């Protein structure tokens, strides 16, 4: 599933954390790692910008050399960061992009780094967004993977990714369907609950011939809040979800649930576009 993984870096702790998470996935799939650092076209000090980019790449190259035998190649590009990342991914047949949600400039918890946000919105490849709270957690690998789903094609596209990663890392899978707007679970036989059960059964069927431990869950409430509470309560290490749910939405916009999870989750989030599932 993943042969080439791209890790963008700006030398920030968030970028290093993303690299470590990318390494976990790369080793599981025997993938090669590509590292890219992008200098802006309007840097006040071009020489300094290139030196910082070189240092950022060198740091990750040393990390990979110390912790893995996987091949690594790196490049420094000049231009608009998200455009350079997407262009490199397209030209080099990248299968997965792994990047931090906050770069050097920080940003508050409720906002994604602008580069990461644009990459997620426009990428043809799946993207793992690693938040600051996930720093250090990758050292124990992924034991529990959460796949939220509403049964839409967008959500279904992420199922295979979650199951495949779980299979390679011997992780268990939790599949969660949220009945939106309800304060309690509807009774058995209710149309909403029956629909949720059907959605979960479809995922279970897809995983039936895979060597994965899978459990299903139905919960009521506001989707992104339920997902984040589930992550905390069950010690989830990775969330895999589609960029768009039932509400659809144009390509350059994220579905509201996915966007809110990305902005508030303590766990890395792997987003998958419907046509890349």
Image: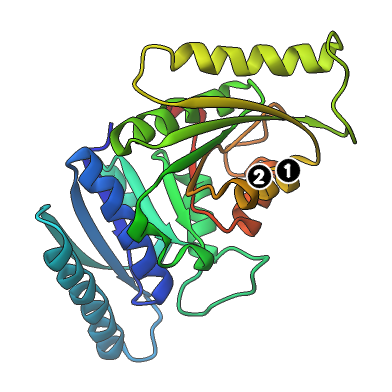
Q: Is residue 271 left or right of residue 186?
A: left
Give the distance between the C-alpha atoms of the residues marked 2 and 1, in whole angstroms. 6 Å
Residue 276 found in image quarter: top left
Depth check, front residue: 94 or 61:
61
| Mark 1: few/some/many CA within 10 Å (<14, 14-19, 20+) | many
Name the residue carrying label 1: 226
Name the residue carrying label 2: 230
Q: How is the image coloured?
A: rainbow
Q: Is residue 147 left or right of residue 220?
A: left
Residue 207: horizontal and vertical position, in percent?
44, 17
Q: In this picture, is 241 found above or below 193?
A: below
Q: Are marks 2 and 1 in contact (CB under 8 Å)?
A: yes
Residue displayed at 66% across by 28% down = 217
Residue 63: horizontal and vertical position, in percent?
20, 69
Q: In this picture, is 52 found above or below 209?
A: below
Q: Is residue 41 left or right of residue 59?
A: right
Residue displayed at 37% across by 58% down = 138
Residue displayed at 41% across by 31% down = 161
Residue 230: horizontal and vertical position, in percent?
66, 44
What quarter of the picture does the C terminus occupy? top left
Residue 97 visible in the snapshot: yes
Q: Find numbered disc 2 in the image and state the secondary structure of the residue it sits on.
A: helix
Q: In this picture, is 99 found above or below 204?
A: below
What quarter of the picture does the N terminus occupy? top left
């Amino acid at each position: 599933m993943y042969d080439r993984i791209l890790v963008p870096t700006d030398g920030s702790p968030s970028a290093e954390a993303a690299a470590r998470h990318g390494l976990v996935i790369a080793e599981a799939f025997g993938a090669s790692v590509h590292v890219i650092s992008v200098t802006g076209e309007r840097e006040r000090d071009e020489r300094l910008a290139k030196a910082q980019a070189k240092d950022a790449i060198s740091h990750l190259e040393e990390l990979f050399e110390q912790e893995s035998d996987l091949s690594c190649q790196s490049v420094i590009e000049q231009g608009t960061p998200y455009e350079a990342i997407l262009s490199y991914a397209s030209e080099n047949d990248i299968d997965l992009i792994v990047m931090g949600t906050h770069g050097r400039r920080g940003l508050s918890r409720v906002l994604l780094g602008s580069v990461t946000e644009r990459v997620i919105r426009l990428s043809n490849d799946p993207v793992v967004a690693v938040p600051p709270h996930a720093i250090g957690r990758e050292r124990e690998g992924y034991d529990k993977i959460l796949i939220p789903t509403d049964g839409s094609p967008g959500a279904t596209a992420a199922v295979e990714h979650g199951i495949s990663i779980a299979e390679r890392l011997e992780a268990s899978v939790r599949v969660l369907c949220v009945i939106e707007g309800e304060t309690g679970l509807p009774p058995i036989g209710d149309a909403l609950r029956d629909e949720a059960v059907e959605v979960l059964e479809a995922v279970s069927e897809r995983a039936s011939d895979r060597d994965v431990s899978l459990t299903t869950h139905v919960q009521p409430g506001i989707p992104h809040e339920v997902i984040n509470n589930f992550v905390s309560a069950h010690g989830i290490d990775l969330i895999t979800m589609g960029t768009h749910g039932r509400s659809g939405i144009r390509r350059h916009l994220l579905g509201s649930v996915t966007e809110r999870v990305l902005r508030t989750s303590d766990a890395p989030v792997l987003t998958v576009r419907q046509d890349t599932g």
